[in-house]
Amino acid sequence: MFRTAYDEALIDSPRGARSREREAIRLSIEYMEAAEQAGPQSRDAVVAANFLRQLWTILMEDLANHGNELPAMLRAQVISIGLWMLRHAEDIRMERQTSFRPAIDISRLVAEGLACDHR
């Protein structure tokens, strides 16, 4: 379901797609903040980590697509962030990390960047 909604967003204008991406990142922040309150072994942490993995997998697939109109250097940088996010989510799942705080902070920065026009 999330994937279908995201695919539809890609058909929309770049501005509309960025807005939807920003909204998805905002939702991931909400999940991660709930997980911070509930703890790293909570159901909220599982939901947050799973959503974070799904979101960044989709975002990175779009960024890797040759049809993506963002500058290549920016795409590579955001993919690098995505890889870090995937590792962080896995580290929480494997109990190597206990806090979503770094991912929350980075997510806020990415959402702010999506509000800017990079074309």
Image (cartoon, rainbow, N blue to C red):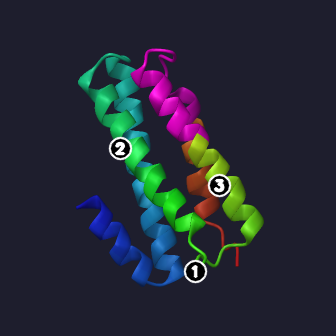
Q: Nearer the viewer, mark 3 or mark 1?
A: 1
On whether residue 17 falls in the magenta region, the answer is: no
Q: Residues within 10 Å of mark 1 (few under 14, many from 20)?
A: few
Report the disc number at residue 78: 3
Where, quadrant-wise, is the N terminus in this rendering? bottom left
Q: Nearer the viewer, residue 22 or 95?
A: 95
Q: Residues within 10 Å of mark 2 (few under 14, many from 20)?
A: many
- Residue that appears at 59% across and 43% down: 83
Q: Amino acid at mark 3?
A: Val
Q: Earlier in the sequence, mark 2 or mark 1?
A: 2
Q: Nearer the viewer, residue 21 or 73?
A: 73
- Residue that appears at 42% across and 43% down: 53
Q: Residue under label 2, please give it.
A: 51
- x and y percentages locating residue 41 in the rendered image: 32, 16
Q: Amino acid at mark 2?
A: Phe
In the structure shown, which secondary structural element does the residue marked by tag 1 occupy? Answer: loop
Q: Which residues are magenta?
A: 84-103
Report the disc number at residue 67: 1
